[in-house]
Structures are given as structure tokens and as C-alpha cells.
Image (tube, rainbow, N blue to C red):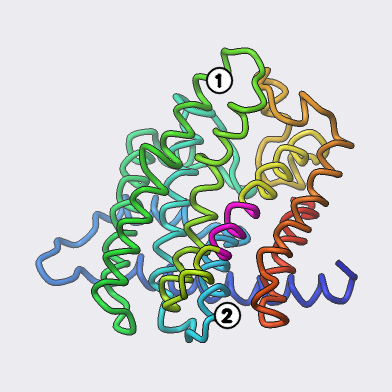
Amino acid sequence: MKHAAKDAFVDRLARSAKLVGNHLNDVLGEAARDGEAQTPQRLSDAMGHGALNGGKRLRPFLVLETANLLGVDVEDILDVAVALECIHCYSLIHDDLPSMDDDDLRRGQPTVHIAFDEATAILAGDALLTLAFDLLTRPKALGAEQKLKLVEKLARAAGRGGMVGGQMLDLAFEKSAGDADLITQIHAMKTGALLRFACEAGAICGNASDEEMASLIRYGETIGIIFQLADDLLDVTASTGTLGKTAGKDVEAGKITHIALYGEEWARNRLRELVREADKCLEAFGQKADVLRAAAHFAANRDH
């Protein structure tokens, strides 16, 4: 990606992150809805600490840009994008717990269990998880069938056969020998499932045709692989200050990754191949998909 194009993409991503962050802040700060008790203040503060501390907001960005590609006004589906971000933030809160990855730092700030306590961190994650499905019921621009499909797809992407199942395999894998196929499966479930859903959700919101849906799902799967491989590469090449979280955790834990198996040069070559694959998935959309093309380039070449 040329420097000017990268700057333009980064600016667009930042504007989207601000839009999503502002809406998420509004949702977390809203008054109790009909039939709902007011959120306890400590729980609300912990949810905000885990969800409003920055980040690229790439997953909601992909929801909005995929829908925008199909002619949807992003303001109409902000709740869908924020629902996915709630799921992602809940997963980070729980991943950082001592019983999981045991991290003290996230996005340059103390993790939720450090800033509050473990029980509050668990409950904050639980609350963000359930809030996500509340949000999916809200968009007035979507029909009941679209909302039902979004609930179904997000539940599967985040659940036992997706992100949660991937985390379970990842925890077990720390104690096993290297297996490239198992690594790929873990990445597809733990990281890729939500990135795939991001693109699928945008396609659902935009009433994509079968052909468009298939292409966008393939793109989402590809960017999921790109994101995780780039993340593994950063774990061994970037500093804690740059990442905003503890660097070198995989190496320290003795976890086998594609980088450990094949090396950094292989990873960089593979990332270039994957970016070309992502480009091919978007061929039918022409120049309208340039933002999504840029997203794949950005994910492959990010420095934090």
C-alpha cells in the first residue's frame, strides 16, 4: 500500500473508530430500558474500562464498510457494529484473567481484573456479551428476518464452535506439540470467526445476493487469517510499548505458532499471498471495494 493510500485508510479507520466509540459510550451510559433495573455503578465502570479504552475497532469497521459497499447508511446499523465490538471486548476481558492468559496490560492500560478485581471483570465481560444481543434487536432499518439471522450468526461465531471453542483449544494446545493444522483451526475459531462474522453481518444488513454473500464471507475468512498471522508476527518483533499489551507472551509460554514452525520470512511471504487472495474475493465489486482491499493490506502490514 502506498504511503498516501495508507494514510487515507488510517484516517478512515480512525473516523470509524470514533463513531463506534461514541455510540458505545452512549449505549453504556444510557438509562435503564423498560423493565430493566439500573446497572450498578461499579459494573458500569468496569464495562467502560474494558470497552472504551481505545483500539482500532477493526471488527465494527468491517461491518460498516461491508454494509456501505452494498448501499447501507452506516448510521442505520451502528448497533450491529457495536454489538460485535461488545463481544470482542468481553473476550479480551476474560482472556486477560489469571485463569486464562494472565495479562496485566491491555491497550496500554491495566486490564479490568487489575483495575477492579477478578469477579468484577468476569461480570463485566458477561454483561458486554449479553448486551451485544440486546443491541442486535434495535436497528429500525433492519427487518425481523435480518435481525434473527444476525443473532444466529453472532451466537455461532462467538460460541462453542467459534471464538469460545477456539480459546478452549488454545488453552489445551499450550501443553501439546506443534501441529500446523491445529494452529490453523484455533486461529479460524478464536480470531477468524468474529472477523468473518463482521463481513457476513454487513452483507446481511445490505441484503447481499448469494454470490455477494459468498465472496464477502471468503474475504472475511481471509482477513481473519491475515490478522492472526500478523498478530503472531508482532508478538515476536514488536515491543510491549508499541503493542499496548505484553509482548513475547507466546514465546514465554512456549506456545507453538506458525512463526515458531516456519519463521518470520515465511510469515511475511504468506501475508503477501493472503492479501492477494483477499483482493480476488472482491473482484466482482470493482473499485467500490477499495476500502476493504485497503483493510486487508493494513491488517497484514500493521505495526501494533
Q: Which quadrant holds residue 154?
A: bottom left
User: Relative to the observer, which residue lies in front, 54 or 257?
Assistant: 257
Q: Secondary structure at mark 1?
A: helix
The residue sitting at 55% across, 33% down in the picture is 186
Residue 108 magenta-highlighted:
no
Mark sitting on residue 69: 2
- Expressed as whole percent of the image width and height from the top left, the position of residue 87 reads 42, 52
Mark 2 residue type: Leu
Mark sitting on residue 173: 1
User: Relative to the observer, which residue lies in front, 237 or 182?
Assistant: 182
Residue, far left: 35
Question: Of callouts 2 and 1, which one flags the residue occurring earlier in the amino acid sequence?
Answer: 2
Q: Horizontally, is 55 left or right of 273 in the view?
A: left
- Expressed as whole percent of the image width and height from the top left, the position of residue 150 reads 35, 63
- Expressed as whole percent of the image width and height from the top left, the position of residue 80 reads 40, 69
- Expressed as whole percent of the image width and height from the top left, the position of residue 278 reads 70, 60
Residue 217 magenta-highlighted:
yes
Mark 1 residue type: Phe
The residue sitting at 49% across, 52% down in the picture is 194
Main SS, magenta residues: helix
Q: Residues within 10 Å of mark 1 (few under 14, many from 20)?
A: some
Which residues are the magenta region?
215-223
